[in-house]
Image: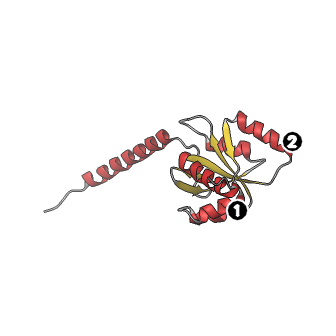
Amino acid sequence: MDFNLKNYQIVKLKKYFKNNDLFFVYQSVKLSLTKWTQTEQNLKKLRLSYYKPLNRTTAKTFQNSVYKKFSSLIGGFILLITTDSKVSKLNLESIIKNLRPSFNLVSVKLNNKIYSLSQLKDMKDLSYKKSVFNLHKTLDKHLKTTYLLTSKKKISK
C-alpha cells in the first residue's frame, strides 16, 4: 500500500466531504504558535473541530470533482470547521462573530451543496425544523390569500 502524503491527503479530504454533511470553509493567514493555540482553545470552547487540508491537493481535488466551480475558493490557507456534537439548532451568526478575528468565512457545505456567503446573507440559523416550519407557515398564508381572492369573484355564465 502506498502511503504517499499527497495521496493520503486526497483520500482523507474526499472522506471528509463524504462523511460530513455540514461544515464551514474558512480562510485565514498562518498564525504563530501562541495565537494558533488560543484559536484552538476558542474552537474547543465553541465545540467545533477543524481539519487543515493541504492547499494544492485541495485545489486539485476540487478541480476533479463535482465541486469544480468552487476550486477558485482555495486561494490560501483554509480550514474546514464542523461541529463536534449533533446539534439540531446551530446559530450561524454567533459562529461567524466568534471566529471573525481569526478567520473569514468563505462558504458552507450543507447536504452535498456548497453555498457562498451571498446565498447565506439573510439566513440566521441552520435549523432544519425551523426552516420547514417557516415554509409551511408561508405556504399556508399564501394559500389562504389565494383562496380568499378567488372565492370573491363571481363567475358569470
Q: Name the front one of labels 1 and 2.
A: 1
| Extreme-front residue of the structure | 1
Where residue 102 sits: x, y (%)?
Answer: 78, 48
Label 1 to label 2: alpha-carbon separation: 26 Å
Would residue 37 be found to the left or right of residue 51 on screen?
right
Q: Residue at 60% across / 66% down in the picture? A: 63
Where residue 108 sits: x, y (%)?
Answer: 60, 52
Figure colour scheme: secondary structure
Quadrant holding the C terminus: bottom left
Q: Image quarter for residue 35?
A: top right
Give SS at disc 2: helix
Please tell me which of labels 1 and 2 falls first in the chain: 2
Disc 2 residue type (three-letter): Thr
Disc 1 residue type (three-letter): Arg
Q: Residue at 44% across / 43% down in the picture? A: 132
Where residue 79 sits: x, y (%)?
Answer: 70, 50
In the picture, the disc for residue 34 is 2
Taking depth in this image into account, of 74 and 127 the one nearest to the observer is 74
- Local crowd at mark 2 within 10 Å, few (<14), some, or many (≥20)? few
Give SS at disc 1: helix
| Extreme-left residue of the structure | 157
In the picture, the disc for residue 56 is 1
Where residue 3 sits: x, y (%)?
Answer: 66, 52
In the picture, the disc for residue 119 is none
Q: Image quarter for residue 33?
A: top right
Would residue 124 be found to the left or right of residue 77 on screen?
left
